[in-house]
Image (cartoon, rainbow, N blue to C red):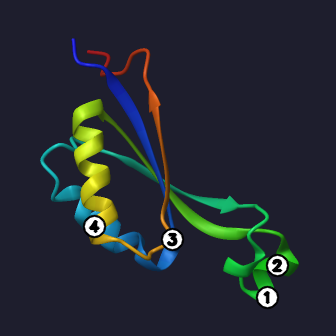
């Protein structure tokens, strides 16, 4: 069995709709979840003055699980198509995932 991974993407709210459309067009992505989050960190230069005062930055988190090979292809395409977007990602191995029938 091919190893499964969890791909998480953190994006700015202003590109949320673009990312939704992009992911929906991808054959290797059978589905994904998205939800609003707050980012906290030490990179104050990337935050507006209001965000610095609030101590957080509004972001959108996308998650999907897919094979490691598919995730690597997807990441390569994301790096190409969204270079300079400030998108953050992480990739974790999954012990299991699927649907309960």
**Residue 15 sits in quarter:** bottom left
Query: Disc 2 and disc 4: Cα gap in Å?
Result: 30 Å
Query: Disc 1 and disc 3: Cα gap in Å?
Result: 18 Å
Q: Are marks 2 and 1 in contact (CB under 8 Å)?
A: yes
**Depicted 65 relative to depicted 28: above or below:** above
Residue 52, numbered label: 2
Give the percent coordinates (x, y) of residue 43: 74, 69
Q: Indicate which label's residue lies in the foreground, 2 or 4.
A: 4
Query: Disc 1 and disc 4: Cα gap in Å?
Result: 30 Å
Q: Indicate which label's residue lies in the foreground, 2 or 3.
A: 3
Q: Indicate which label's residue lies in the foreground, 1 or 4.
A: 4
Answer yes or no: is residue 67 visible.
no
Q: Is residue 51 left or right of residue 1?
A: right
The kind of secondary structure element at disc 1 is helix
Q: Are marks 2 and 3 in contact (CB under 8 Å)?
A: no
**Residue 6 sits in quarter:** top left
Residue 80, numbered label: 4
Location of the N terminus (image quadrant): top left
Q: What residue would you read off at disc 3?
A: 86
Q: Residues within 10 Å of mark 2 (few under 14, many from 20)?
A: some
Query: Disc 4 and disc 3: Cα gap in Å?
Result: 13 Å
Q: What residue would you read off at disc 1?
A: 49
Q: Residue sitting at 32 percent across and 24 percent down?
A: 4
Give the percent coordinates (x, y) of residue 70: 22, 38
Q: Residue sitting at 69 percent across and 61 percent down?
A: 39
Q: Residues within 10 Å of mark 4 (few under 14, many from 20)?
A: few
Q: Residues within 10 Å of mark 1 (few under 14, many from 20)?
A: few
């Amino acid at each position: 069995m091919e190893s499964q991974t969890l791909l998480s993407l953190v994006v700015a709210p202003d590109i949320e709709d673009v990312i939704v459309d992009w992911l929906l067009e991808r054959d290797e992505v059978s589905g994904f979840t998205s939800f609003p989050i707050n980012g906290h960190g030490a990179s104050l230069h990337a935050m507006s003055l209001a965000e610095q005062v609030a101590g957080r930055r509004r972001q959108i988190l996308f998650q999907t699980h897919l094979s490691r090979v598919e995730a690597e292809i997807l990441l390569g395409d994301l790096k190409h198509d969204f270079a300079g977007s400030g998108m953050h990602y992480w990739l974790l191995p999954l012990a299991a995932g699927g649907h309960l029938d």
